[in-house]
Image (tube, rainbow, N blue to C red):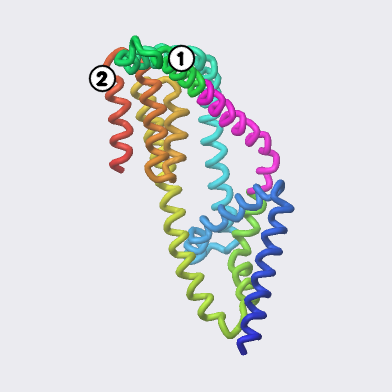
Amino acid sequence: MFAAHTKKIWFWLGVGVAFLGFLYLIRTILLPFVLGLLVAYFLDPAARWLERRGYSRTTATSILIVGFFGGMVLVIAALAPVLYDQIMAFFKALPEYLRKGKEFIAPQIDKVMSGFRGTPVAANSQEVLSNASESALEYAKTILVRIFTSGANFFNTITLLLLAPVVAFYLLRDWQEFIQRVDELLPRESADTIREQMREIDNTIAGYLRGQVNVCLILAAFYMVGLGLTGLNYGVLIGLISGLITFIPFVGAMLGFIAAMAIALFQFDEFWRIAAVAIVYGLGQMQ
């Protein structure tokens, strides 16, 4: 009995390792299929809701896929020109921001080193701090360039993403059949236990993921509108990124806040405008 149970464990471990190896081998073409699977997973409750109201599964799937991807196309078409202009403007202004940052940091270094003037360590320490500040600013510039370069490379895969609606359509249409086929692969003596555990996992993951997606989208829209109303440069770009990375607790919101406040301090002379940017983020975190 024990030997048979051990064999089953090793068998399923082998299946898992083989599956992960297969995913690794096809990783370069996996993106549209993963995206299609996620879309089908998220839209399945809506498809079942439409089915209960008399629509066939194919009709419900068609309505949802067209609505979902059509909405994405409209949003991207509306935001792409604005985001492109703001990204280009940001890179154009980045050297000036770095210069102002250096001008701001240099006096702070002088203040720190004022208590050491006249000592042998002072000159070397000041030089080290100055070099460190320059290195930090250059490193920040490099990171930003890499982020946007990676984004540009991502958009180069748009031809692959054209497969995502097709994959999502067939997966969503045949979702129940797909689940049934998986169910048939379960070991019969443990099938009830596995089904119960999977239902609990599904409810937990679905609730968390759908909640996080809704929060990210709502906050992205709120930050884009709020920062745009304050007149902040690159407000739409910063607001979009701030909203989309809020799924990282604390860190996501803090990074967006720091970026927005840094731009506000360089851009605005009026205190109330800087305070308005801070208020936008404060209200966002109260949602």
Residue 143 drawn in magenta: yes
Percent position of residue 127, x then y: 46, 14
The majority secondary structure of the magenta stretch comes to: helix
Percent position of residue 26, x then y: 73, 52
Q: Nearer the viewer, mark 1 or mark 2?
A: 1
Res. 81 in view: no
Mark number, residue 170: none
Identify the magenta region.
138-164
Mark number, residue 127: 1
Q: How many marks?
A: 2
Res. 64 in view: yes
Residue under the point 51% across and 14% down: 95
Percent position of residue 239, x then y: 42, 31
Left or right side of 180 for 109: left
Vertical relation: 266 (above or below) 244:
above
Question: Helix, strand or loop at disc 1?
Answer: helix
Q: Residue lying farthest left? A: 272
Residue under the point 59% across and 68% down: 176
Crowd rating for badge 1 (residues with CA inside 10 Å; few <14, some 14–19, many 20+): few
Q: Which residue is mark 2?
A: 272
- Amino acid type at image mark 1: Glu
Percent position of residue 274, x then y: 30, 21
Residue 2 drawn in magenta: no
- Amino acid type at image mark 2: Trp
Crowd rating for badge 2 (residues with CA inside 10 Å; few <14, some 14–19, many 20+): few
Q: CA distance from mark 1 to mark 2?
A: 37 Å
Looking at the picture, tell me which residue is in the foreground, 186 or 5.
Answer: 5
